Amino acid sequence: MNATQIERYSRHTNLSDIGPQGQQKLLDSTALIVGLGGLGSPIAMYLAAAGVGRLIFADFDVVELSNLQRQIAHGTDRIGQLKSHSARQTCNALNPDITIETIDSVLDTESLQEITPQCDVVLEGSDNFPTRFAVNEACVRHKVPLVSGAAIRFDGQVSVFSGYKDDVPCYRCLYAGGEDTAETCAETGVLSPVVGMIGTVQATEAIKVLAGFGRTLEGRLLLLDGLSMEWREIQLPKNPDCPVCGGHSS
């Protein structure tokens, strides 16, 4: 690290669990963020500030006025702008020391197979099951950890999926029925800080994965009840019959 980086990341390097070596791992890492909305905004901003060296933002949607209640990477002056470009502008202002690339089209199976092997972690913040399932399948195939989060109304959930490992579930193990519909914030509403809380946990888990410290949420689903402000944890077993990762069971 150069002198500027040493000062910028000093609060990380002062942590014995991270130190200069852990920070260098972050600087050498690549993270793909799928969706730059309510979850992706805090994810992107914290990973940029933390010094993850290469960020790839994937989102083909544009900023709308109704997004601004919770999607903090965007501003009123960017309505109509691609969310991936708006988030890049915000994150470059936070930290010009990193590289940010954008994917402004739908992530299909082909594009996921191309981009996922380049990544050290993938963070999923989309609002539909087909995208979540496709991202999960690519992560299992290419052995890349997936940090997945979701939030609706006053509730949220987050976990780390590494289904390519023995006895560790993938995202599809959680949704064995293969749901093809999902409620959206536009339909049911969401309390704005809730997506920030879940997205911030996702960013924390990704940093732990990349720098190699702490205990991640692998095999555990963390659930937030924002109305009572209670967190609870559910143990997630691997599904030996999972169509995506079942063959990886020991």
Image (cartoon, grey):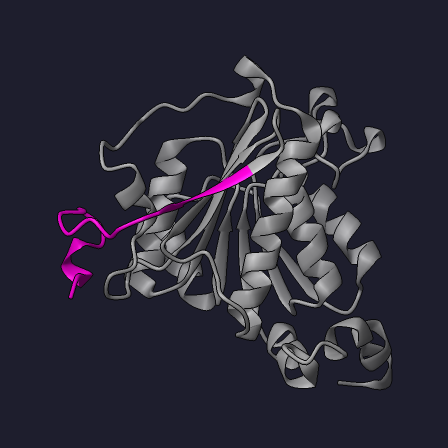
Q: Where is residue 163 in the image (x, y as percent from the top left)?
A: 30, 58
Q: Is residue 45 above or below residue 40?
A: below
Q: Where is residue 209 in the image (x, y as percent from the top left)?
A: 51, 67
Whether residue 102 is visible to the viewer of this picture, yes or no, is: no
Q: Is residue 145 above or below residue 19?
A: above
Indicate the quadrant where residue 16 lies.
bottom right
Q: In this view, does 194 lie above or below 93?
A: above
Q: Is the magenta stretch mostly helix, strand or loop?
A: loop
Q: Nearer the viewer, residue 96 or 201?
A: 201
- Which quarter of the image is occupied by the N terminus? bottom right
Residue at 86% from the left image edge and 77% from the top image edge = 7
The residue range painted magenta reads 231-250
Residue at 70% from the left image edge and 55% from the top image edge = 46
Residue at 40% from the left image edge and 66% from the top image edge = 117
Q: Which of 104 and 149 is in front in this view?
A: 149
Q: Is residue 235 magenta?
A: yes
Count the marks: how many?
A: 0
Whether residue 86 is visible to the viewer of this picture, yes or no, is: yes
Q: Where is residue 162 in the image (x, y as percent from the top left)?
A: 35, 60
- Which quarter of the image is occupied by the C terminus? bottom left
Q: Which residue lies furthest to the top in this view?
A: 187
Q: In this view, does 20 lie above or below 96?
A: below
* Side of 174 where 114 appears, left or right: right
Q: Position of residue 202 (x, y in %)?
A: 56, 51
Indicate the quadrant where residue 79 lies.
top right
Residue at 46% from the left image edge and 39% from the top image edge = 106
Q: Which of 66 and 188 is in front in this view?
A: 188
* Side of 149 where 53 appears, left or right: right
